[in-house]
């Protein structure tokens, strides 16, 4: 299996994520012209758009939900589907009988595409809001800002546990708490994880599985190779690596405010320059969330 450079791996992560973001933009641009759009409609259209790119496994590594894609709809007055413990249970999979409200709707979307050449992932997720409730808009901005503050705090040599502690403190400062339950994380909760190394560094038997393109088995390998940004993880930030930043803040004692999540990737280059991948801007503009760009 051909070796890739660290810089090539970082660029692959960026491109894979951008494919997911651009495909979501195309899917929404098409579907928002229609009257009745279900969770399944958006999932399938997003998958269709990603399938136009031959460089990725669009169904992704995160499973379940089916096809590695999450789509959840709610509204100002009904946000229970947004307040999930985990995306894996069947009741959280996209449904064909829940429809988007384009006046006061809230969406959470997530996809986990995998690069076919290297096995590098480019996860993308975001909360989208069509309504005008100023309180919800305020907390959308706060939660997105928290991700940026975590990114600004990260330094090469810093242990993951220190990043997690800072994230907890900044979340608590805003009267929020982090609502993540992970069945694959030894700490049970976290605010992100590493982007696993390329398949060329995997064990030989794992490389054979990857070359067979059996996505079901590839998913298990990718999932097992993550290190979590948690309270117990001592692994340190290094040059030429990437981590996700994906807390899921909820407002204490305000059940009317849904859980909000922006799934970013933080790329640390070999020269220790740190970059935050967003790719949300076009989608914010498309759905009228210009306040998120301020």
Image (tube, rainbow, N blue to C red):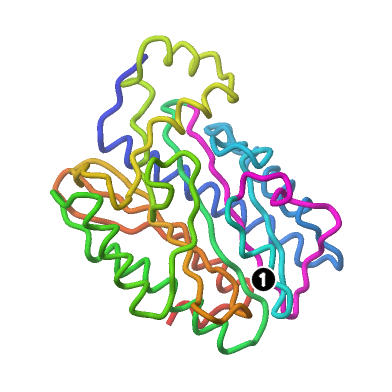
In this picture, is 266 found above or below 118? below
Q: Position of residue 46 (x, y in %)?
A: 67, 49
Q: Position of residue 56 (x, y in %)?
A: 54, 34
Quadrant containing the N terminus in the rendered view: top left
Relative to the observer, which residue lies in front, 191 or 28?
Answer: 191
Total marks in image: 1
| Quadrant assignment, res 151 | bottom left
Relative to 142, 34 lies left or right: right
Relative to the observer, which residue lies in front, 32 or 84?
Answer: 84
Q: Main secondary structure of the magenta part?
A: loop
Residue matched to label 1: 106
Classed neighbour count for the residue bearing mark 1: other residues with Cα under 10 Å, few (<14), some (14–19), many (≥20): many
Relative to 235, 20 lies left or right: right
Q: Position of residue 268 (x, y in %)?
A: 24, 49
Q: Going by the picture, which residue comes out furthest to the bottom?
A: 134
- Membership of 27 in magenta stretch: no
The residue lying at 63 percent from left, 46 percent from top is 69
In this picture, is 241 found above or below 105? above
Relative to 224, 154 lies left or right: left
The residue lying at 27 percent from left, 47 percent from top is 232
Disc 1 element: strand
Q: Which residues, given as a range, are shown in magenta?
A: 87-116
Relative to the observer, which residue lies in front, 4 or 37?
Answer: 37
In this picture, is 132 found above or below 47? below
Q: Position of residue 55 (x, y in %)?
A: 52, 32
Quadrant containing the C terminus in the rendered view: bottom left
The residue lying at 76 percent from left, 61 percent from top is 31
| Quadrant assignment, res 145 | bottom left
The residue lying at 67 percent from left, 77 percent from top is 130
């Amino acid at each position: 299996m051909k070796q890739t450079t660290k810089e090539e791996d970082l660029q692959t992560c960026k491109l894979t994520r951008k494919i997911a973001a651009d495909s979501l933009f195309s899917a929404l641009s098409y579907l928002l012209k229609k009257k009745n759009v279900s969770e399944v409609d958006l999932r399938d259209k997003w998958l269709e758009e990603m399938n136009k790119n031959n460089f990725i496994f669009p169904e992704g590594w995160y499973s379940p939900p089916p096809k590695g894609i999450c789509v959840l709809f709610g509204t100002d007055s009904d946000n229970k589907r947004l307040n999930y413990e985990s995306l894996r249970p069947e009741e959280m999979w996209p449904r064909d009988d829940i429809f988007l409200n384009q006046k006061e709707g809230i969406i959470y979307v997530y996809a986990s595409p995998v690069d076919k050449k290297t096995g590098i992932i480019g996860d993308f997720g975001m909360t989208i809001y069509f309504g005008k409730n100023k309180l919800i808009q305020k907390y959308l901005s706060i939660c997105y800002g928290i991700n940026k503050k975590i990114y600004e705090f990260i330094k090469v040599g810093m242990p993951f546990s220190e990043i997690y502690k800072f994230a907890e403190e900044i979340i608590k400062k805003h009267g929020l708490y982090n609502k993540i339950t992970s069945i694959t994380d030894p700490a049970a909760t976290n605010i992100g994880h590493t982007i696993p190394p390329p398949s060329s560094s995997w064990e030989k038997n794992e490389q054979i599985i990857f070359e067979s393109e059996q996505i079901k088995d590839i998913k298990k390998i990718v999932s097992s190779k993550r290190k979590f940004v948690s309270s117990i993880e001592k692994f340190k930030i290094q040059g030429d690596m990437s981590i996700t930043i994906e807390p899921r803040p909820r407002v204490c004692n305000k059940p009317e405010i849904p859980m909000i999540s922006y799934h970013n990737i933080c790329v640390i280059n070999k020269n220790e320059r740190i970059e935050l991948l967003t790719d949300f801007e076009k989608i914010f503009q498309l759905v009228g969330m210009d306040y998120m760009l301020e």
